Amino acid sequence: MFVYNTMSRKKEGIRALKDKRLGFYACGPTVYFYAHIGNMRTYVTEDLLRRALAHEGYVVRHVMNITDVGHNVGDGDVGEDKVRAEARREHRGISEMIDFYTGKFLEEEALLGIQRPDVMCRASEHIGAMISLIEKLDGKGYLYRTSSGMYFDTSKFKDYGRLLGSSFEKMSKELKAGARVERPAGLRNITDFAVWRFAEPNEKELVWDTGYGRGFPGWHIECSAMSMEYLGETIDIHAGGTDHIPIHHTNEIAQSEAATGKRFVRYWVHGAFMTIGDRKMSKSLRNVYTVEDLVKRGYLPLSFRYMCLTVHYRNMMNFTFDGLEHAQRSLKSLYAFISRISAIEGVGHVDQELIDKAEALRKEFFECIGDDLGTPTALSKMHGLMNLVRGVKLNGSESRRILDIMLDLDSVLGLEFNMHLSSALQKEAKELIGKREDARRRKDFRTSDEIRSRLRDEFRITLEDTEEGTVWYTSTD
């Protein structure tokens, strides 16, 4: 399997160091507000990567952090912690707010079919690991103290900026010329960053008394400390959005490799931004949507996941409701196809030529996935499989072979085809759907509508008629 490694700027074959076991770290949310659909696109990509690796036989240990302290309003180590600032604005306790937005994040991930990481670690629960890492850096002479905190001297790390294809000297010059955001007083270099910030006297929550003073960690030190605690000093895969490349991930590399003297990450995987109607997604522009917002507008959450899969993860994705509508129609057509072929029973002679063509499409699908998660072309292979059997009168033996292939494809796509198998329906609901199909063929639309209403009211099943057939799904209202 090949992925594009941001560090080498080329596709590289993934090789586990031992027994096909891979450590996979992903930057999680800062829980001061709802995660919007641009954020969720990144998590869909990471879930896709994890599923694809598992399909190839890798044993993946997936770790994601929850940032509940240390992420400042800006990237310049000045201003308030985002979590504290939002808690004050909302007039609620910090712990209460952290729990609320963490819960919302997990709910929306589940709606998108995103598998829960093996480890979800809160920054506030790993202060000891961060202090240990800070002590290593201090002992090696990489840190210095200012009036606002302990800072990493980026001039002492010779490869600073290489993830960005740059250098310490070049980055310093460009940042000075670009009049970067305000920086704290006393910095030796414009690229230096805080590993520990001193707390103000009035700050009571999420502050700790340490040998470096009363305060809280810098954002970057958190990911280094937690990834090392759960995955070791060298991790296989580190994922995140492209916005993390110039500062957050660049600083993670510097402090991690300075502390250990080892390579920090073997494969860096970054997903591109999402725009809304070709405009940047921003709270200030009031064009931010959550998964819950999409559901309230009548969309299936997995329609958004399908939409994400139609664009390669390294390409900019422009979100429009017309695009989401098209994705939803395609998804419902897939569900109708799954429902129809899974209802075919009995046995019969297998058309081996048909099955061979289907198996060839399965192979091509996974070749596309294995080529840097090429989901757009992989989806075309899946729809090619549907077209292959469209109009063919399948028997039970053939339908089971086709269904096996479709479920295999979905083990990576994560569109929950298994929820739309005929066998997933209760017996009575299945019989009602069959009776409704008979009524529609007889053009008895009154009976058809009555059955539709009964399915909705008694079984919370919504029916929709598509070109592929009737699709059913559990109602969200």
Image (tube, rainbow, N blue to C red):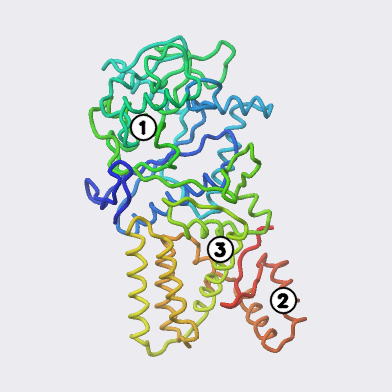
Q: Amino acid at mark 1?
A: Thr
472 is higher (above) or lower (below) than 15: below
- The quarter of the displayed image where residue 262 is located: top left
Q: Few, some or many C-alpha atoms within 10 Å of disc 1 (few <14, some 14-19, many ≥20)?
A: some
Amino acid on which disc 3 is placed: Ala
Q: Which x, y percent locates residue 317?
A: 50, 52
Quarter of the rendering occupied by the C terminus? bottom right
- Per the image, label 1 sits on a secondary structure element best described as helix
Residue at (61%, 32%) from the top-left corner? 97
**Relative to 354, 89 lies left or right:** right
Quadrant of the frame with the N terminus: bottom left
| Disc 3 target residue | 327
- Disc 3 versus disc 2: nearer the observer: 3
For disc 1, the marked residue is 250
Residue on which disc 2 sits:
451
Q: Earlier in the sequence, mark 1 or mark 2?
A: 1
| Nearer the observer, 363 or 342 | 363
The residue lying toward the viewer, choosing from 276 and 421, is 276
- In the rendered view, would you say 225 is above or below 454? above
Q: CA distance from mark 1 to mark 3?
A: 36 Å
In the drawing, what numbered circle is on residue 127?
none
**Quarter holding residue 268:** top left
When asked about the image quadrant of residue 141, the answer is: top left
Say whether disc 3 or disc 2 marks the residue closer to the N-terminus: 3
Nearest to the observer: residue 163 or residue 365: 163
Q: Position of residue 440 (x, y in %)?
A: 69, 84
Residue kind at label 2, given as amino acid type: Ile
Q: Are marks 1 and 3 in contact (CB under 8 Å)?
A: no
Please tell me which residue is depicted at 30% across the width and 18% down the height of the picture. 142
